Image (spheres, grey):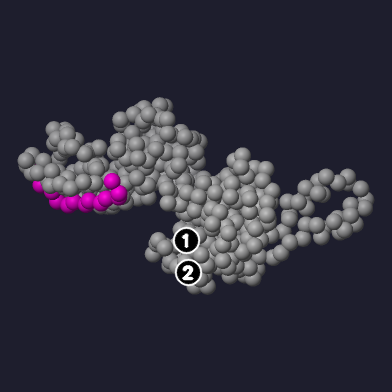
Amino acid sequence: MYGYYCLNPISQVGLKEFSKKYEQAELAEKADAILVRSADMHQTELAPGVAAVARAGAGVNNIPLEQLAKKGVVVFNTPGANANGVKEMVLAGMLLASRDIVGGIEWLKSQEPAEDLAKKAEKEKKKFAGCEISGKKLGIIGLGAIGVKVANAAVHLGMEVYGYDPFISVDAAWNLSRSIHHINDIAEIYRDCDYITIHVPLLKTTKKMIGKEEISHMKDGVVLLNFARDLLVDEEALCEALETGKVKKYVTDFANPVVAKAPNTLVTPHLGASTEESEDNCAVMAVKQIMDYLENGNIKNSVNYPDCDAGKCVDAGRITINHKNVPNMISQFTKTLGDAGVNIANMTNKSKGDYAYTMLDVTSPIDSQVAEALRNIEHVYRVRVVK
């Protein structure tokens, strides 16, 4: 039996995907895998038996990736599972920023329900008038699962869409509408677009990627939308631009003291993926990834180890090894198995930055002594016998 533990409430639709081989552990210390949404794991000390952490969502800033990688713990996320929910929030954000719908609603709420309310509203409505998004230029920075959905939807709404992503995947490219202008210079988006939306992960290279200089190159009266991560934008520089009117509106899903009371901002309380459908989809994907990893050793959508898929083992046994990405590791594995008289039928090795993952299918069962010998090799973080 395998045990799983949930640090946050996880959709039952997803948890029902676990087979009879799995049971929910009462304590995290007794689990083979951890499921998490927003809980901060940076101060969490995982038990040695935990082999995987699955984030039911895309962002993993709440998880200590490097620390877990060195313990041989594979961290998964669920890219694309919540893409439609976020896409709809971005579209709503553009509409709310273009026409003062919120202001109009608040004005009506403040009025006494008198008989002349309708006439009064007719006189006041010009204060809340805005523009249509059809015919406007939308710039999308990042054409991943969410960016592609936003781009395609915006085209159908009559917008002229420009997309920037130097690392666009083949799948994303195939799903992108032909009407979208795929550009190679992000400066074109800053210079030409009426609306700009960001859909990139938060990395050292993307932190505060929208700063004072980038804003200075944008069109006057631009609308900036951020449903990815707040730290992608230098919000202090942004607030200056909001004060001067350089940026007409900032729409963000991340409430913090800097933007909460800033002028011309529309701040939502992290609602992007807060739909039943998104939570269900993320949970289902997370559970399936955990099962495939624990039972077969396959890795898909990991953020700290390389993706690696050897299908189901058809030989006598399979060993998986999480290790540092340094020379001479493979030769040490094969020598250890050779000295024990174990023949390798199939081998897969992948690396991702400082970390690597090796899967070895063998023609005879692996005993505990062989597994221990592999664990004792320098730079090996974890050895699992999955069959």
State the mark number for residue 182.
Answer: 2
Q: Can residue 156 be seen in this view?
A: no
* Residue 338 rendering spot, x and y as whole percentages: 8, 44
* Residue 79 rendering spot, x and y as whole percentages: 44, 51
Vertical comparison of 16 with 146: above or below: above
At label 1, the amino acid type is: Leu
Vertical comparison of 28 with 274: above or below: above
**Magenta-highlighted stretch: main secondary structure?**
strand
Name the quadrant of the C terminus: top left
Q: Give the range drawn in magenta.
A: 342-354
CA gap, disc 2 and disc 1: 9 Å
The reply, left or right, for residue 167 in relation to residue 100 is left
Q: How many numbered discs?
A: 2
* Residue 213 rendering spot, x and y as whole percentages: 54, 57
Residue 173, image quadrant: bottom left
The reply, left or right, for residue 272 in relation to residue 385 is right
At label 2, the amino acid type is: His
Q: Is mark 1 on a helix, strand or loop?
A: loop
Task: Please name whichever residue, 92 or 385, is drawn nearer the observer in this view of the structure.
Answer: 92
| Residue at x-position 37% and y-position 40% | 65
The reply, left or right, for residue 302 in relation to residue 175 is left
Please rate how many residues cluster around mark 1, counting C-alpha atoms within 10 Å: few if below 14, some from 14 to 19, many from 20: many
Task: Please name whichever residue, 367 or 328, is drawn nearer the observer in this view of the structure.
Answer: 328
| Residue at x-position 71% and y-position 64% | 131
* Residue 142 rendering spot, x and y as whole percentages: 48, 59
Task: Please name whichever residue, 1 or 249, is drawn nearer the observer in this view of the structure.
Answer: 249
| Residue at x-position 40% and y-position 41% | 54
Q: Mark 1 points at which residue?
A: 143
- Mark 2 vs 1: CB contact within 8 A: yes
- The answer to which of marks 2 and 1 sits earlier in the sequence is 1
| Residue at x-position 47% and y-position 61% | 143
- Residue 123 forms part of the magenta stretch: no
